[in-house]
Image (spheres, coloured by chain):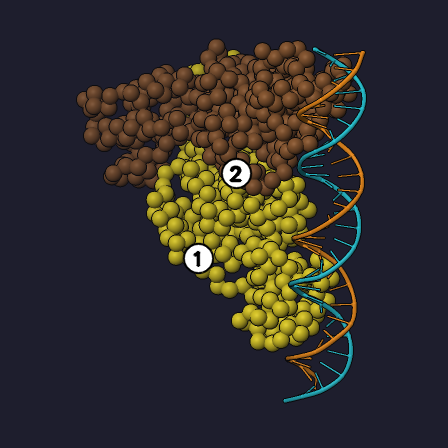
Chain colours: A brown, B yellow, C orange, D cyan
DNA sequence: TGCTGGCACTCTCGGGCTTCGACTGCTTAA
DNA sequence: TTAAGCAGTCGAAGCCCGAGAGTGCCAGCA
């Protein structure tokens, strides 16, 4: 759709603008190494690119800046292979060779790694618990009417739910319920555990035990969607890419709402994209932002996603490769466990 | 040290500057209700206040702005009682009447509450685990060489530590170790549990069990300082108080380092302060910020602290009362559990 | 002695003006 | 189709100037 020279000019404009944040004029483009025509020719082509919606002019007699369509074409058609620099890939390697242990810590550190690689805000969404099976379940009485249910999942994640009882309950009863619950749901997934029909288990139980079991199963059925783990790092880096405090404040407001962030990422992935540019993010407050996302795969299953959030004038190639590499390594590291 | 009129003038300057962020001139002060002298007199006093270090002039023929010393005097000597508005205290009441359940969720919500009350960033540091006793301990084998130790504390908090074993270990061994560990440390505090001499328990154990126990105790002794829970909310609100993106970025960088934030708060409390102004925070990057802190008390013991971080031109009275009220209510709510 | 009014002075801020320079679009010629 | 030239446009930067806000100081008055 775009002849080769126009594409080259578009690429030159986009890369230059990403670098400098200044509108790019025809002279700059003409003096670039990749373009061997005069500035007048460039002007003609840039006018055409503007007419077709790839570029825009802040005002007459200023250079051009890319539109969302321009960035989109750049990302889809012009994006280089985008390899990580040596020091960056070294950083990734040493990170993943050293990391181990607690998952939360690892995911949190991963968000730091990703933001330090890209200098944008990094979002790491922890694995869904849906595929993990229940390794162990325990009920601990904290006070006569308060019981804490602690589940250990095969992924190493822990869920805890507090259960408030209607009547004071003895520890012995709680323990009996714990044993029964353990045989009921160990080895199952959270989803199948919570779908157990609590009516069917009254037989043979004392009323107290049955009450606890019902309460525990009910609480499992609750929104386990809700406790998605999200780790966000590098907001301070990202902020430096903007110049209006107002914008920054709005973006931070989005990032504070973890649910919104998660659905933002998933929304992008659901649309089959790995990059959402400006309004493509689906959020008006992020009109000046782009998102680069990738899912990561643990044991053959898509487990979660990671992404970076930066300005529309983002170093897309670097961000894309950083996200891809980190997603890959993260998935492999988590699979080993 | 400051006569009454000077104090009144200082108060007028500080309140006006907090409100408008503009240097305050003698005319403004003289026309205020609280001051009944002419602007010339005010000028003389303001010059004196400047000589004594309470005020500063951005440039000749501009009004005065408070120095840190000025804010300090204002906070120490001139601070009004600072009651919460009706809608704010209503908000606090309904929040604490509705809140219950998971501690993490509650603390996180508390940070949101506090930031929405003050429009500054709110920091909530979760209870130290030092006083809590161990309610239950469990070892779960995730893979042949990886065991997860899950502790439930009397506070309802959960600690997990992964333990990597040198050799493949059977679940039976793990369970035996779990039973042994449970009798060893249940009812103790984390501190006393981790100080158990692992040498003394070899007798009577199989070598495998002893190995696991040693590893588990070692891991408990690790930095349980490290997993302080910190919840930070309302950064987007706070950001709006500043006008340079550069400053914002530096402040965010501080807030991203949770350990720094915790020690910042504790440092202020250790110095016996409830407010740290500008450089008093001990952090150069926070030269334009102030911190208001209060500890909260659970079951008669100081458990943790909450605070807000805002610009030096902060509404100190509102912030102080909001922090005090929320700390109080939070302590009471946690004590009930 | 302390307060006040008056006065001269200083310095920032904003508007208006001009210049400069970086662009563009168009026209024309090869 | 490309290049070169040229006129035109518009923002940015510099400058001047007046307005306004605010100060410091002095002299007089209670």
Which one is nearer the viewer's eye here, D15 or D30?
D15
Which one is nearer the viewer's eye here, B28 or B319?
B28
Q: Would you identify the image quadrant in which residue B260 lies?
A: top right
Which residue appears at 49% of the width and 56% of the height?
Answer: B318
Instruction: Kindly identify which chain the residue marked by label 1 belongs to.
Output: B
Q: Would you identify the image quadrant in which residue A245 lies?
A: top right
Which residue appears at 75% of the width and 24% of the height?
Answer: A27
Q: Is residue A178 above or below residue A246?
A: above
Q: Residues within 10 Å of mark 1 (few under 14, many from 20)?
A: some
The residue carrying mark 1 is: B84
Q: Is residue A179 left or right of residue A301?
A: left
Q: Is residue A297 above or below residue A249?
A: above
Disc 2 to disc 1, C-alpha distance: 27 Å
Q: Is residue A105 above or below residue B313?
A: above
Q: Position of residue B269 (x, y in %)?
A: 57, 52
Which one is nearer the viewer's eye here, B3 or A191?
B3
Secondary structure under badge 2?
helix
Which residue appears at 41% of the width and 16% of the height?
Answer: A131
Secondary structure under badge 1?
loop
**Same chain, labels 2 and 1:** no
Work out whether residue A258 can be spotted.
yes
Q: Residue furthest left?
A: A203
Which residue appears at 61% of the width and 23% of the height?
Answer: A50
Which one is nearer the viewer's eye here, B126 or A66?
A66
Q: Position of residue B298 (x, y in %)?
A: 44, 48
The residue carrying mark 2 is: A250
Disc 2 versus disc 1: nearer the observer: 2
């Amino acid at each position: 759709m775009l002849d080769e020279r126009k594409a080259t000019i578009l690429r030159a404009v986009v890369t230059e603008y990403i670098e400098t944040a200044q509108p790019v004029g025809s002279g700059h483009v003409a003096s670039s190494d990749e373009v061997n025509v005069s500035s007048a020719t460039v002007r003609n082509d840039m006018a055409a690119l503007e007419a077709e919606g790839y570029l825009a002019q802040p005002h007459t007699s200023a250079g051009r800046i890319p539109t969302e369509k321009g960035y989109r074409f750049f990302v889809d058609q012009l994006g280089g292979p985008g390899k990580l620099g040596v020091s960056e890939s070294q950083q990734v390697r040493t990170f993943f060779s050293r990391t181990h242990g607690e998952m939360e810590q690892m995911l949190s550190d991963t968000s730091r790694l990703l933001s330090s690689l890209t200098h944008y805000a990094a979002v790491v969404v922890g694995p869904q618990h849906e595929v993990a099976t229940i390794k162990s379940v325990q009920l601990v009485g904290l006070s006569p009417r308060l019981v804490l249910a602690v589940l250990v999942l095969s992924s190493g994640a822990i869920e805890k739910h507090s259960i408030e009882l209607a009547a004071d309950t003895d520890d012995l009863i709680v323990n009996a319920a714990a044993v029964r619950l353990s045989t009921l749901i160990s080895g199952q997934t959270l989803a199948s555990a919570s779908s157990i029909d609590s009516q069917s288990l009254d037989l043979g139980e004392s009323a107290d035990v049955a009450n606890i079991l019902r309460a525990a199963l009910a609480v499992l059925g609750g929104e386990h969607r809700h406790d998605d783990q999200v780790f966000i790092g590098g907001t301070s880096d990202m902020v430096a890419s903007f110049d209006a405090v107002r914008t920054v404040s709005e973006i931070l407001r989005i990032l504070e709402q973890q649910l919104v962030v998660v659905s933002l990422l998933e929304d992008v992935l659901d649309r089959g994209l790995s990059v959402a540019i400006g309004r493509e993010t689906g959020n008006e407050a992020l009109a000046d932002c782009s998102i680069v996302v990738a899912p990561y795969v643990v044991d053959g299953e898509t487990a979660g996603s990671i992404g970076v959030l930066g300005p529309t004038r983002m170093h897309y190639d670097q961000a894309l490769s950083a996200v891809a590499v980190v997603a890959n390594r993260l998935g492999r590291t988590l699979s080993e466990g």
